[in-house]
Amino acid sequence: MKLSVIMPVYNRERFIGSALRSLLNQRDSADLDIIVIDDGSTDGTAALVRSLAAGAPCIRLFQQANGGVTRARNAGLRQLLPQTRLVTFLDSDDISPAGRFKADLVLFEEDPDLELAYSRMTLVDRLDDETLEPATDSHTITVRGIHLSAGIFARRLVDRLGRFDEDFRQAEDTDYLLRAFECVTRYTMPETVALYYRRHAGNMTREPDVPAREFMRAIHKSMKRRRADPGLRRIEGIFDLKALAQWRFW
């Protein structure tokens, strides 16, 4: 089954090489299609991606004027191949752990009706860019978080969900996940660690006030949808919100 991985990027020359290598290391476990959307980077990001793509044709680079992460994600969705059957995401400063795809893709082979596998994530303050693992002296916490990279989505679910809501400056991923869980017909929640989320000074979630405001807006939209359509699923109990609240104080 073809698995497309959408990676938006803006000025991440420092990290994107490690992110891409973590995917390429799993080519034996997945028929990968890596879609990199360069959202107007002004550093060496595009050149680095091209150098890796020269030896790995599964990497496809698309460049556009800077329009923000939500538009970049939608640009990635527009580049899905006709043969793509599964879709996931990886942010350009994070790592896909070794064995992640081998563990979770088999779930779709065993259950043709499965639409979403939603795994766990490890938040890390220091990653070793050689081993692609948490550094020995890092602080970590593993949770059922709110992150697109934790999910592998069946193509039919992606087609049903449509595009990311470009009204969001941040939390477009939260809104997308809430919409997915509201309408998904069959999902599973494996114990697989799906990503290492790299905590660093440049994280968008460190921007003052904006993440909390956008997150609450996504929650409010979910509540309005479910009030309007009682047939939608409730989303309580899916995410480890208490653990995520502790992580905010790192």
Image: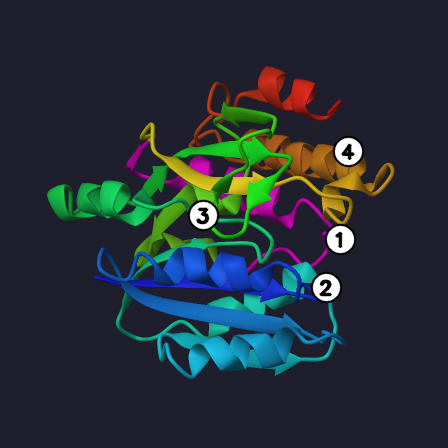
Residue for badge 4: 212
Q: Is the residue under label 1 in contact with that under label 2 (CB below 8 Å)?
A: yes
Q: Position of residue 145 (x, y in %)?
A: 53, 31
**Sequence-wise first label, 3 or 2:** 2
Residue placed furthest toward the top: 242
Which mark is nearer the camera, 3 or 1?
3
Earlier sequence position, callout 2 versus callout 1 = 2
Secondary element type, mark 2: loop
Which residue is depicted at the point 60% across and 53% down?
93
Q: Quickly name the residue at label 1.
A: 169
Mark 2 crowdedness (10 Å alpha carbons): few <14, some 14-19, many ≥20? some
**What amino acid is at disc 3?**
Thr
Mark sitting earlier along the chain (4/3): 3
Give the labeled residue for mark 3: 131
Lower position in the chain sequence, tag 4 or tag 2: 2
Q: Which residues are magenta?
A: 163-188
Q: Amino acid at mark 2?
A: Gly
